[in-house]
Amino acid sequence: MVRILTLASGAGSNFQRLLEEHSHHPFDAQFVGLIVDRPNTGASSIAERNSVPVSMVEYAAFEERSHFEAALLQCIHSFEPDLIVGAGFMRILPEEIVHKFQNRIMNLHPSLLPAFPGLHPQRQALARGVKVSGCTVHFMDSGVDTGPIIAQSVVQIPEGCDEQTLTDLIRIEEHELLPRAVRMFCEDRLRVEQGIVNIRKSV
Ligand code: GAR
């Protein structure tokens, strides 16, 4: 049984989809907790409705980033996770956590990495005039959106598309992609060799 800890900062639609997928087509996992970095997130309401324990490590409540990181580390350890899933978590994780949970932290990012890492990837994509974008699930390393890529989905960008429309189009794909990646992890199908994720066929 894989103990999954989710990290989120926002509405939590991807977290919701993960819970739904697990309840409709179960995989060998237990959602042991949710950590949020701010109050009043949609994600925490979803966790409460689904009896998933919620902890808040409020970024704004700490005067120094290092204190926030220490509290986050302690909170993560308290859940004893096997897999950490960043589902719209808008903080960079401290090196110590990334190192400790190497190839056990997934991040969801709304672009086709390595294109457009960092903030506002949809805006970056539109500004560059690319004709396709999409979303990526990858293992976190110590860089910004640079870790081994697990899965990606492509979105065609319509003529005249604005940032919100692109965000919505990408989110439709994210709702399929993240559960698929988490399921593959829980089925022990992901192997990382020299920075490349190899996926074993399902049996
Ligand atoms: C998702 O679009 C995810 O790709 C993005 O936050 C959104 C969360 O939506 N993550 C990042 O930008 C991380 N850098 P949700 O709260 O509805 O799941």
Image (tube, rainbow, N blue to C red):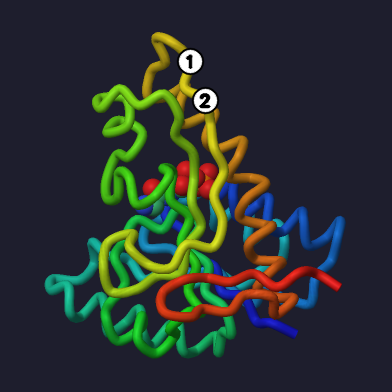
For label 2, the crowd category at 10 Å Cα-Cα, with few meaning under 14, some 14 to 19 and many 20 or more, is few
Residue 47 appears left or right of 11: right
Pointers 2 and 1 in contact (C-beta within 8 Å): yes
The residue under label 1 is 158
Whether residue 156 is situated above or below residue 50 in the rendered picture? above
Badge 1 marks a residue whose secondary structure is loop
Picture disc at residue 156: 2
For the question of whether residue 72 can be seen, the reply is: yes
Residue nearest the viewer, comparing 89 with 39: 89
Q: Does the residue labelled 2 lie within 8 Å of ligand 1?
A: no
Locate the C terminus by quadrant: bottom right
Q: Name, please, the residue furthest toward the left.
A: 64
Picture disc at residue 136: none
State the image coordinates of residue 196 (x, y, percent, origin top left): 47, 71
Q: Residue at x 52, y 74 (%)?
A: 84
Rounded to the nearest angstrom, the CA distance separating label 2 from label 1 is 6 Å
Residue 57 appears left or right of 197: left
For the question of whether residue 11 can be seen, the reply is: no
State the image coordinates of residue 128 (x, y, percent, origin top left): 25, 27
Q: Which residue is drawn at 51% across and 57% down?
A: 137
Locate the N terminus by quadrant: bottom right
Q: Residue at x 23, y 61 (%)?
A: 60
- Amino acid at dot 1: Pro
Q: Quadrant location of residue 38? A: bottom left
Q: Name, please, the residue furthest toward the top.
A: 160
For label 1, the crowd category at 10 Å Cα-Cα, with few meaning under 14, some 14 to 19 and many 20 or more, is few
Q: Residue at x 67, y 57 (%)?
A: 179
- Amino acid at dot 2: Gln
Number of numbered discs: 2
Whether residue 14 is situated above or below residue 199 in the rendered picture? above
Residue nearest the viewer, comparing 2 with 59: 2
